[in-house]
Image (cartoon, helix red, strand yellow):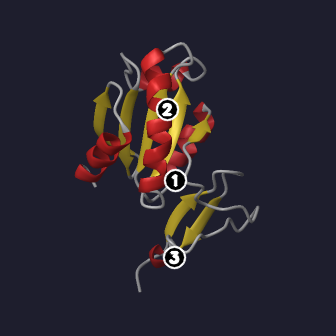
Amino acid sequence: MSDPIHIVCPQCDAVNRLAPARLSDNPVCGKCAQALFTGKPLDVTSEQFARHVGRNDIPVLVDFWADWCGPCKMMAPHYAQAAQRLEPRVRLLKLDTECAQDVSARFAIRSIPTLVLFKGGREVARQAGAMDAGRITAWVESHL
């Protein structure tokens, strides 16, 4: 039996311990009883970003975007489709660079949209520019 992994709840941000084999069993949060995976990207604040990237044991993909960005808006439905394809193997987050300028500066986000893939709290890959769902999924899977 493999060691349990940690999954941060998308609703209440509680850290849950889960057997890896149960990832695809529609697990729920032990604190709020909501689904741990919704098949949708999660909009996060700076604080939530730190918790999800730092405490999730599964890879975390972050879309750095802004409301005024046309390519970001064009990519949004594709990113949502990628979430349906990649969860529960990967947690997908969306971080508004205007609201979280501290995080954007720390990760030197120079253009948007920018996708950053984290494993174990560390950046492992980065891709700038809008992509469709197939390309997002293929890009992530190439780094897993």
Q: Who is closer to the viewer here, 94 or 39?
A: 39
The secondary element bearing badge 1 is classed as: helix
Proximity of marks 2 and 1: CB atoms separated by less than 8 Å: no
Vertical arrangement, residue 129 with respect to residue 13, above or below:
above
Amino acid carrying mark 2 in the image: Ala
Residue, disc 3: 22
- Secondary element under disc 2, as helix, strand or loop, is helix
Foreground tag (3 vs 2): 2
Q: What residue type is labelled 3?
A: Arg
Considering the image in quadrants, where does the N terminus appear? bottom left
Percent position (x, y) of residue 29? 68, 65
Looking at the image, tell me whether mark 1 or mark 3 is earlier in sequence order.
Answer: 3
> Relative to residue 48, is residue 90 depicted above or below?
below
The answer to the question of whether label 1 and label 3 lie on touching residues, with beta carbons closer than 8 A, is no
Q: Name the residue under label 1.
A: 55
Residue indicated by mark 2: 76
**Residue 13, position in %: x, y?**
66, 51
| 26 to the left or right of 87 | right
**Which element carries disc 3, helix, strand or loop?**
helix
Amino acid type of the residue tagged 1 in the rendering = Arg
Q: Which residue is drawn at 27% across and 48% down?
A: 138
- Within 10 Å of disc 2 (Cα), the crowding (few <14, some 14-19, many 20+) is many
Specify the label residue 5 is tagged with: none
**Residue at x 61%, y 65% (from the top left corner):** 16
Q: Which of marks 3 and 2 is nearer the N terminus?
A: 3
Tell me the distance, in whole angstroms, between the alpha carbons under discs 1 and 3.
18 Å
